[in-house]
Amino acid sequence: MSSTQAPTQQEIELQAAAFRRLQQHLMQDRTDVQNIDMMNLAGFCRNCLSRWYQEAAAERGIDIGKTEARELFYGMTMDEWKANYQTEAKPEQQEAFKVTFAQNVEKG
């Protein structure tokens, strides 16, 4: 697909399938992977994915709240996720996160 052509239906379906697999991977297969590690290594995390989903919905006139969007990437409420899977971030992770967050989230 070139950058000026609209994706074909098949490309849309393949992209959606890959997206659903990523969702499953993060919700079920790799619950051990912490968001802070994802942010520090890749510049995005589950919260970013949920925000991008929410933004895409808004562009199409669909109102999806932050909580609802996050549940799509956690497979449960954020409080449940934190209680079941989130570990305490180390000071060096928190320091790296400040830089990564500023580079990837705050800039828009």
Image: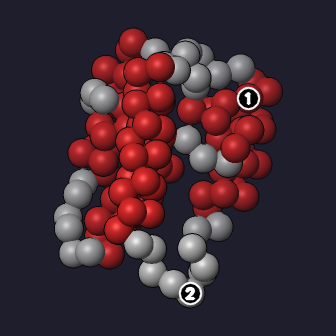
Amino acid type at circle 2 is Thr
Callout 1 secondary element = helix
Give the image location of residue 44, x and y in percent.
60, 47
Where 58 falls versus 39 (above or below)? below
Q: Which numbered disc, 2 or 1, marks the residue that appears first in the sequence?
A: 2
Which residue, given by chain and number where applicable, does mark 2 sit on? 4
Give the image location of residue 7, x and y in percent.
45, 74
Q: Nearer the viewer, mark 2 or mark 1?
A: 2
Q: Is residue 65 left or right of residue 50?
A: left
Q: Residue furthest bottom?
A: 4
Circle 2 residues within 10 Å: few <14, some 14–19, many ≥20: few
Residue at 58% x, 23% y is 33
Residue at 43% x, 37% y is 21
Can residue 97 be seen at all in this image of the molecule? no
Callout 2 secondary element = loop
Residue at 38% x, 14% y is 83
In the image shown, does 62 or 86 lie closer to the viewer?
62
Q: CA distance from mark 2 to mark 1?
A: 40 Å
Circle 1 residues within 10 Å: few <14, some 14–19, many ≥20: some
Amino acid type at circle 1 is Gln
Residue at 23% x, 57% y is 64
**Picture colour scheme:** secondary structure
Quadrant where the image shows the C terminus: bottom right
Which residue, given by chain and number where applicable, does mark 1 sit on? 93
Q: Quadrant of residue 65?
A: bottom left
Q: Quadrant of residue 13?
A: bottom left
Where 77 falls versus 3 (above or below)? above
Give the image location of residue 107, x and y in percent.
65, 67
